[in-house]
Amino acid sequence: MTATVIDGKAFAAKVRGQVADHVARLKEAHGITPGLAVVLVGEDPASQVYVRSKGKMTVEVGMKSVEHKLDADTSEEDLLAVVKSLNEDPEIHGILVQLPLPGHLNEDLVINSIDPAKDVDGFHISNVGLLGTGQKSMVPCTPLGCLMMLRDHHGSLSGLNAVVIGRSNIVGKPMAQLLLNDSCTVTIAHSRTKDIQDVVRGADVVVAAVGRPEMVTGEWIKPGATVIDVGINRIDAPEKGEGKTRLVGDCHYDSCAEVAGAITPVPGGVGPMTIACLLANTVTACCRANGLAEPEGLTA
């Protein structure tokens, strides 16, 4: 068996197209332009690249993009003041504070200072609680992207056995809740799970989000299962030359692809969906703020 490759780049482009169409309709019919504000504290290189990419794609889909770049030694009081001003700005519908923050800042305090209705990362404790009780919420972008790809591939997920490997607040826990809300039978596996290979082998859907390069091998996978690899790990690649590296997922791609029915690659799988879903969440937040119908197919 050779797995079908779930092309995250192509799917993300499709989602961005849907977002752009909805933004155009909001402008034309209601005179409203969704606005996304990103706050970056410090000069972490990876965060800078990510923020630039977010800003570029926000503009490309026709939305308003605002960036606040603050020094690494910015005080908590000053950062909270920036968030407060964005909470009160009617032209801003989505607020994202780029993580990680410098060590002297309390991430939980900062995230929970964002208006939950503008929390397009879905990290605010109110949104976590709403998602956990099956109510309308802002959903974390990476799990939302995984759910969209799974729905697209399977149609209905009802009754499928799903195993989520990893229990982080950002991916593992919300992913499990989304699958449960779609009527999957869900198991969360983690570093203390006994006989983890046997647990994973019983799954129709495997979502790997543990941050360990190529941990999951083909021997773990049930024939025909769908594998969603959230991991992005950089490892040495001596075959490319001295000091060279390459990106791999949490799954050993070649061996898993021989057994699975469908699989996401790394890179080019889940990664592109994260920003696409951030844009989708911003449009959803804008529609909710203005009492308008939410975009179909872009929410959980």
Image: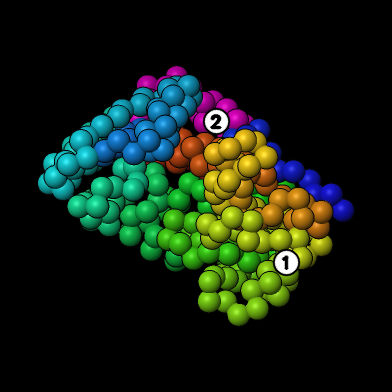
Query: Secondary structure beneath disc 1?
Result: helix
In the rendering, which numbered label is found on residue 66?
Answer: none
Residue at (42% x, 32% y) in the render: 49
Query: Secondary structure beneath disc 2?
Result: helix
Q: Quadrant of residue 220?
A: bottom right
Give the farthest residue toward the top: 28
Q: Which residues are magenta?
A: 13-35
Give the farthest residue toward the front: 242
In the rendering, at what x and y percent does residue 106 appear? 23, 55
In the rendering, at what x and y percent does residue 182 appear? 61, 60
* Residue type at the position of mark 2: Arg
Q: Does 23 appear in magenta?
A: yes
In the rendering, which numbered label is found on residue 220?
Answer: 1
Residue at (67% x, 40% y) in the render: 239
Left or right: residue 265 versus residue 210 is right
Q: How dense is the environment of label 1, judged by Cα within 10 Å: few (below 14), some, or many (20 and up)? A: many
* Residue type at the position of mark 1: Trp
The main secondary structure of the magenta stretch is: helix
Q: Which of 240/16 is in front?
A: 240
In the rendering, at what x and y percent does residue 35 appear? 35, 30
In the rendering, which numbered label is found on residue 16?
Answer: 2
Left or right: residue 215 versus residue 125 is right
Q: CA distance from mark 2 to mark 1?
A: 34 Å
Q: Earlier in the sequence, mark 2 or mark 1?
A: 2
Residue at (64% x, 70% y) in the render: 185
